[in-house]
Image (tube, rainbow, N blue to C red):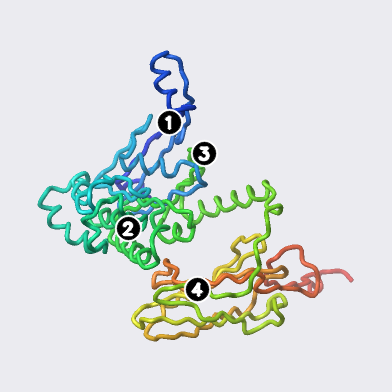
């Protein structure tokens, strides 16, 4: 973020502490006896960052790192123990299910309540209410108490309210992991429109792919402190290295092995599905390739709606499931395909850059933004690479060796 830009969110030395009591009566005993019966848990410690207008910032980290606490403080759900927060403009948040809803109020009453809390006057609320109701697609349930809602219905209502009130800053905390595929796709489209329209997004997700697509910068929290803050690619790479090192340190090899089925349909029910994923080269149940061999993958899929557009993607994984490479239409800059009910596409890798190893593969059928996954197919032990001689590493590097001294006329015989 440029230093000359006025930040829409400025956080300085933010700290949040909670008092943890051993039992329900301990708080009363502490008040009566004036003797401390709690311990202090510091969920956030000295968090500092700024967010500019139109900028996306991802909040990443392990469970319990303080991500949700940070977003709750920024949304005003809870107050900080120390530090300052300066937010310029309307801020709207989609936090855990039911946050901000009165369970005995109907969906419509909660729309009015939340819109008023976000600063809309009565005329604005009346004008926006029909659009909020329509976008949530709750039907007659909009006039039923929220306590009767399923988790998917609750997030529909929350997302509809949060994105229809024209916020300057939108906070999303793992909301896209809830709900059916149709609404996930619809919500992602709304987030794309929000970001492209110049909105500022604070996005918390364990999906590092979504983080990389939506956000220019990332904030990595570890034990409530800022472990890294910077360009998303750099921070995500550092976070992934940390996770791999932690996995190795905890003896990941001792974990129970995952089953190794070959390519099987996912059973996806939706507007599109994968039909077949076929390797055109290699041989055997687990096709074997030589280093630098040609690798061709044919992917077939079908859609009920020819007007929908699709990207296809493929991930190659090492045996420990570390992602090594990403292939596909979006990666190579190809426009999404559309206009048919059935498709057959080819991914052609002229020189497979692996020298040895057994590799897993995940084929993905994606929407036109390459964000929402309509269908996926995981293929364990998809292929192997075996060279003619031993190589110390899995990757090959194209090279040429020249003995310059043999052509040097000054070299004495």
Label pair 1/2, CB-CB below 8 angstroms: no
Instruction: Tell me the residue at 55%/82% (across/down).
Output: 298
On the picture, is 23 further left or further right than 83?
Answer: right
Q: Which residue is mark 1?
A: 17
Q: Is residue 331 above or below residue 230?
A: below
Depth-wise, is mark 2 or mark 3 nearer the camera?
Answer: 2
Q: Which residue is mark 2?
A: 153
Q: CA distance from mark 1 to mark 2?
A: 32 Å
Q: CA distance from mark 4 to mark 1?
A: 45 Å
Give whichever of discs 3 and 4 has the lower sequence position. Answer: 3
Give whichever of discs 2 and 3 has the lower sequence position. Answer: 2
Q: Nearer the viewer, residue 15 or 164?
A: 164
Which secondary structure lies at badge 4?
loop
Q: Which residue is mark 4?
A: 267
Which secondary structure lies at badge 2?
helix
Instruction: Tell me the residue at 30%/49% (across/down).
Output: 147
Depth-wise, is mark 4 or mark 1 nearer the camera?
Answer: 4
Give whichever of discs 1 and 3 has the lower sequence position. Answer: 1
Q: CA distance from mark 3 to mark 4?
A: 39 Å
Give whichever of discs 4 and 2 has the lower sequence position. Answer: 2
Q: CA distance from mark 1 to mark 3?
A: 13 Å
Depth-wise, is mark 1 or mark 2 nearer the camera?
Answer: 2
Label pair 4/2, CB-CB below 8 angstroms: no
Residue 48 horizontal/vertical position (percent): 41, 38
Q: Which residue is mark 3?
A: 223
Q: Residues within 10 Å of mark 3 (few under 14, many from 20)?
A: some
Q: Quadrant of residue 293?
A: bottom right
Label pair 2/3, CB-CB below 8 angstroms: no
């Amino acid at each position: 973020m440029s230093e000359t830009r006025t930040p829409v969110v400025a956080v300085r030395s933010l700290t949040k502490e909670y008092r943890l009591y051993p039992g329900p009566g301990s708080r009363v005993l502490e008040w009566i006896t004036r003797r401390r019966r709690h311990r202090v848990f510091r969920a956030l410690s000295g968090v500092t960052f700024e967010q500019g207008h139109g900028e996306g910032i991802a909040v990443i980290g392990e469970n319990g790192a303080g991500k949700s606490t940070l977003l709750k403080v920024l949304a005003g759900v809870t107050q900080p123990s120390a530090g300052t927060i300066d937010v310029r403009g309307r801020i709207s948040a989609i936090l855990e299910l039911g946050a901000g809803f009165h369970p005995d109020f109907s969906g419509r009453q909660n729309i009015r309540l939340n819109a008023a809390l976000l600063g809309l006057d009565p005329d604005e609320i009346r004008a926006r209410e029909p659009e909020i109701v329509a976008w949530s697609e709750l039907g007659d349930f909009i006039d039923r108490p929220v306590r009767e809602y399923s988790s998917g219905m609750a997030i529909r209502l929350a997302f509809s309210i949060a994105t229809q009130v024209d916020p300057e800053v939108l906070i999303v905390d793992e909301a896209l992991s809830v709900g059916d595929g149709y609404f996930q796709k619809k919500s992602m489209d709304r987030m794309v429109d929000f970001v492209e329209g110049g909105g500022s997004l604070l996005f918390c997700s364990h999906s590092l792919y979504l983080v990389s697509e939506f956000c220019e910068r990332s904030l990595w929290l570890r034990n409530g402190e800022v472990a890294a803050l910077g360009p998303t690619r750099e921070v995500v790479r550092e976070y992934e290295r940390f996770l791999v090192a932690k996995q190795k340190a905890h003896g990941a090899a001792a974990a129970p092995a995952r089953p190794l089925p070959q390519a099987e349909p996912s059973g996806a029910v939706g507007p599109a599905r994968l039909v077949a994923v076929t390797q055109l080269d290699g041989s055997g149940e687990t096709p074997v390739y030589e280093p630098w061999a040609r690798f061709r993958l044919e992917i077939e899929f079908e859609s009920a709606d020819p007007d929908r557009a699709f990207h296809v993607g493929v991930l190659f994984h090492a045996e420990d499931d570390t992602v090594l490479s990403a292939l596909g239409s979006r990666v190579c800059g190809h426009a999404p395909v559309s206009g048919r009910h059935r498709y057959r596409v080819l991914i052609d890798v002229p020189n497979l850059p692996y020298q040895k190893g057994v590799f897993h593969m995940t084929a993905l059928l994606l929407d036109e933004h390459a964000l929402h996954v309509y269908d996926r197919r995981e293929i364990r032990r998809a292929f192997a690479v075996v060279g003619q001689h031993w190589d110390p590493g899995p990757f090959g590097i194209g090279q040429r060796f020249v003995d310059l001294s043999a052509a040097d006329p000054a070299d004495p015989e």
